[in-house]
Image (spheres, helix red, strand yellow):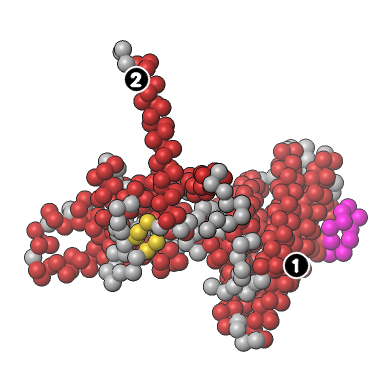
Amino acid sequence: MMPADDQSTPGAADDPARTAPGSRTHARAADQARARRLLLWYPRCWRSRYGDEFAELLIDERAELGPSWRRTVNIAATGLRARLAAAGLAGHSVDPESAARAGLASMAICAAAAILTGAVMWSQLAIGLQWSVPADSRITQAIDLMSAAMLALAAAALLAGVPAAWAAATAAWRGQGRELIRPAIMFAGGALVMVVGGRHFASAWPGTGGHLLVHQSLIPGKIAAFGWAATMWITSYWAHPSALAAFPAPELAWMALSPAATGCLLTGVAQMLRRVQMSPRMFRYEMCVGHLALAGLAAFLSGALCWLSLSGGETGPLFLAGTIDRAGLAVLAVSVVAGAAAVRMASAAAPCRPTVRDG
Amino acid sequence: MTRAGDSSADRPARSRRATADQGAALETLGRSSGPASLILSSLADGAKHGYALTKDIEAFAGVRLAPGTLYEALSRLEAHGMIEAVESHDRRRPYRLTATGAAALSTYLEAQRNVAEVGLRRLAGSWAQT
């Protein structure tokens, strides 16, 4: 809900109650509380630098001009821009060094969001390929492009993750990694739940036939099934509660648990990237991997766009695009654009930083 | 004492280039460049805190900067070294102009004056009769 410069009272100068000595302190406290609420639009780093003086300005402004929704909208807009800047996604940040690290973390989150939504499409298509061939060969080519992009994204995740994990482990070995404990636990817990649960529900589903390398496609059936199980909660069934109620209870529990586990995993990754010590060289390396991931995302987006544009009545039921796929494509496109902005901002901030370290 | 290569002939050119670079910095503040020029103009006669800046700008320019806009521009100006915070025991922290900010403001205002002079001269020539 929007923290509001509320309309309950006129300006202090016009309010007789405020001129009474006993109520002046109370009015001052109320003004400060109101200003503090408005400050919540801004990120923590901005508040710690400008919070006190900005609150004083808001109190003075309100005392002179009274409440104003225009002022609230202005604060909300500039506060959100400051938040985008602090996340390394746009504009100017109060702390460029931490914004560079935040940009890296934002890129990771964007890539993860794109991979998640991409996996929903890709896994159903890969499973479909176990059983039939699309009527239009261009759909097969689009799926091949999406599979190659998924492989590139997996490689990028590995290339980015191993050095970051090594840096975190080194910091922990030297006793400097206390702030990394919580993200590490979140990451490990989320990953454990996803791997165990994903494998269980992938094995329980008979659709893939369990072939390692089947005749229709180079995509191992078990990997496709794992992708399907891990993203089972991203479904249009949520809009059809009666159909959803027919699902077995364990599957429903998994659909409720897996998004929480995915959120834990991604939060852990983002916090780790923001806190782990990185040399400028390592930071530039991570940026290079970020560019590789962006190229992979763009390739996947192209393949998905091609599939959705060709999907129709004659493509076969296993390759028919649904509403969830169209929504996924929109999320994918937004993620690619936001990821590109994050990489651009982080790259711009990175070269002049002597060190990129914990914050 | 004159260093090698520091002739009087190339000194003005270098000085112009330096001020042009600093002037460009004010333009690169993006959406904040308009408010930034007002803030720098206000600070040109001494340090002021946020509310005093708002009132002064309203008095000389007829523009009331909203609080968010004011601080967005202040943080950018501070990051570019054009203004600096003054130590204060009060929660209202004053800001003052730096040499970089003064040079940037001077270049910006010179350019604005040139535009104004040309515009007024052409108006006087072409539209004086109407």
Task: State the CA–CA distance, disc 2 to disc 1.
Answer: 69 Å
Q: What label sits on residue B124 in the rendered view?
A: 2
Query: Can residue A10 be seen in this snapshot?
Result: yes
- What residue lies at 75% left-to-right and 38% top-to-bottom? A310
Taking A141 as reference, is A9 left or right? left
**For the residue labelled by badge 2, is the local secondary structure a helix, a strand or a loop?**
helix
Q: Quadrant of the N terminus of chain A?
A: bottom left
Q: Is residue A212 magenta?
A: yes
Q: Quadrant of the C terminus of chain A?
A: bottom right
Residue A160 % position (x, y): 72, 66
Residue B41 % position (x, y): 34, 48
Query: CB under 8 Å between callouts 2 and 1?
Result: no
**What subunit carries mark 2?**
B
**For the residue labelled by badge 1, is the local secondary structure a helix, a strand or a loop?**
helix
Residue B125 % position (x, y): 37, 17
Q: Taken as a whole, is the magenta stretch helix, strand or loop?
A: loop
Q: In the figure, A63 relative to A254: above or below?
A: above
Callout 1 crowding tier (Cα within 10 Å): few <14, some 14–19, many ≥20: few
Which residue lies under the disc numbered 1?
A158
Q: Between A146 and A245, which is closer to the camera in this rendering?
A: A146
Disc 2 marks a residue whose amino acid type is Ala
Query: Marks 2 and 1: which is nearer the front?
Result: 2
Taking A183 as reference, is A78 left or right? left
Q: In the figure, A60 relative to A322: above or below?
A: below
Query: Can residue A34 be seen in this snapshot?
Result: no
Q: Between A174 and A327, which is closer to the camera in this rendering?
A: A174
Residue A132 % position (x, y): 84, 49
Instruction: Please give the range of residues in magenta.
Output: A209-220
